């Protein structure tokens, strides 16, 4: 386990895409059957992740500031400060990777 580790490629892509409002790059960071779990609401597959992203992430002008990164095998936990038109404040995102891509992203406080 490494604290303040470098971001794995897929996680970096997801964060950079969010911060740059790049919808295509955001979706490309996930496996085709990827999952976003946003406080227990799950969005599975590219179409549902795209709808979530359009409503609650890039569509809400979210911006992520990375505070801390922990990597343990294929799991990456990122402490973020989020700003935008919806949620503003600290959050933790736990990402399960499948190679360089995100298989599951879980958002919690």
Image (spheres, helix red, strand yellow):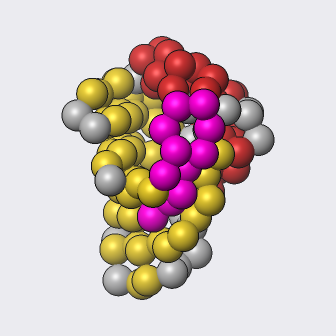
Query: Residue at position x 73%, y 34% from top?
Result: 21
The magenta stretch spans residue 82: yes
Task: Find the magenta span and give its range.
Answer: 79-89
How many numbered marks, from 0 up? 0
Residue 101 seen in the current view: no
Q: In the picture, residue 2 is in which quadrant?
A: bottom left
**Relative vertical location of residue 46 with respect to residue 94 in this rendering, above or below:** above
Query: Residue at position x 55%, y 49% from top?
Result: 82
Q: In the picture, residue 77 is in which quadrant?
A: bottom left
Q: Quadrant of the N terminus?
A: bottom left
Q: Where is residue 60 drawn, in percent x and y?
A: 61, 27
**Relative vertical location of residue 59 with respect to residue 82 in this rendering, above or below:** above
15 to the left or right of 90: right
Q: Where is residue 12 drawn, in percent x and y?
A: 62, 57
The magenta stretch spans residue 57: no
Q: Where is residue 42 drawn, in percent x and y?
A: 29, 28
């Amino acid at each position: 386990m490494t604290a303040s580790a470098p971001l794995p490629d897929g996680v970096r892509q997801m964060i950079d895409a969010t911060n740059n409002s790049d919808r295509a790059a955001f979706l490309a960071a996930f496996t085709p059957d990827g999952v976003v779990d946003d406080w227990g609401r799950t969005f599975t597959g590219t179409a549902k992740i795209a709808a979530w992203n359009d409503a609650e992430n890039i569509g809400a002008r979210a911006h992520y500031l990375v505070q801390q990164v922990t990597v343990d095998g294929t799991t990456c936990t990122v402490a973020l400060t989020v700003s935008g038109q919806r949620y503003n404040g600290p959050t933790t995102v736990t990402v399960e990777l499948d190679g360089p891509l995100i298989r599951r992203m879980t958002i919690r406080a």
